[in-house]
Image: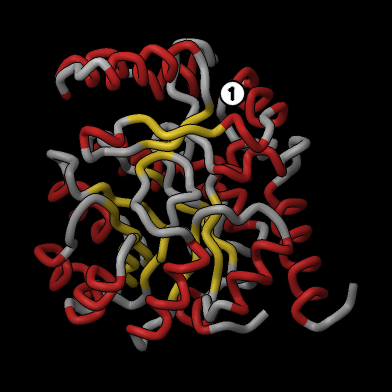
Amino acid sequence: MNTRITELLGIEYPVIQGGMAWVAEHQLAAAVSNAGGLGLIGAASAPPEVVREEIQKAKELTDKPFGVNVMLLNPNAEEVAKVVVEEGVKVVTTGAGSPAKFMPMWKEAGVKVIPVVASVAMAKMMQKGGADAVVAEGMESGGHIGSATTMTLVPQIVDAVSIPVIAAGGIADGRGYAAAMMLGASAVQMGTRFVVAKESIVHENYKQKLIKAKDIDSEVTGMSTGHPIRVLRNKMTREYLKMEQAGASFEELELLTLGSLRKAVMEGDVVNGSVMAGQIAGLISKEETCAEIIRDIVENGEKLLHGVN
């Protein structure tokens, strides 16, 4: 599989695993990279020494390219940005802001910088700032979301920039892969499907909630605060939406969800925890290895693209 992204990153298949907080650690990243995609370690709000340790552990498990997702709002972002360079990581994806201040350091070290964007304006700004590619993420994705859908966002960004575009949000199988490629993307990024990978450390309760999810089980909290997050409905989301409708303050709402993602991912509390997942959760029916997931997506997607039904 040759696309602009496979050539840019030196990977076999144009499939990238999302840098999900608490989920995207060294085992999952290495498994995705070993399967021919690009695995990502989600730095989230982790201290720099933890990120360094994760990178070193991933290196022990794979000799293929892998990257780190740097959340720019993280107070430790500057130290994490340096760790990436010191450890020789060659790919970085970024979220929650602009990576402009780290760009000279990363570029000098030969790091490929791929910001996640939710608008054409942001994509143009990132290209102007020296980004090597962008991830165009639609609101169908799990976790923090923008307001445009993948179907509308991807082609508009493809038309607006000359750098490669990676489609994300609402992609779970070969049909989503083929659709993204038809919209002009050079690769796809998936999070939710990899959450249920056999190599994923996510608690079994979380995986089972995803596998049992129906199309109507996804909802968005935090619309009124300007920080919308897509999750699977549970007791916590019902309480959150009730408080939100009653006009609770941002601080009160934050207090309700403090540590809730860790609670769900690590402890398996899918009642009071935050079960972040994309709208495609209803398409996921089983746990598979990363290699099986990538093979399924690429093989079926390529058949569709070449007219073989």
Residue located farthest toward the front when viewing the structure as drawn: 246
**At which x and y percent is residue 165?**
44, 75
Foreground pick, 97 / 104: 97
- The image's colour scheme reads secondary structure
Q: Position of residue 258 (x, y in %)?
A: 28, 18
Is residue 237 in sight in this rendering?
yes
- Residue 59 visible in the snapshot: no
Locate the N terminus by quadrant: bottom right
Residue 129 image offset from top left, x and y in percent: 17, 77
In this picture, residue 270 sits left or right of residue 133? right
- Which image quarter: residue 243? top left
Query: Residue at coordinates 31% horizontally, 56% vertically from top-left?
Result: 87
Q: Quadrant of residue 164?
A: bottom left
Residue drawn at the location 52% of the way across and 82% of the way down: 7
Q: Residue at x 25, y 79 (%)?
A: 127
Q: How many marks?
A: 1
Q: Amino acid at mark 1?
A: Tyr
Residue 217 place in picture, x, y as percent:
59, 29
- Residue farthest along the left direction in this orientation: 101
The residue lying at 15 percent from left, 20 percent from top is: 249
Q: Nearer the viewer, residue 173 or 242?
A: 242
Q: Which residue is mark 1?
A: 206
Q: Secondary structure at mark 1?
A: helix
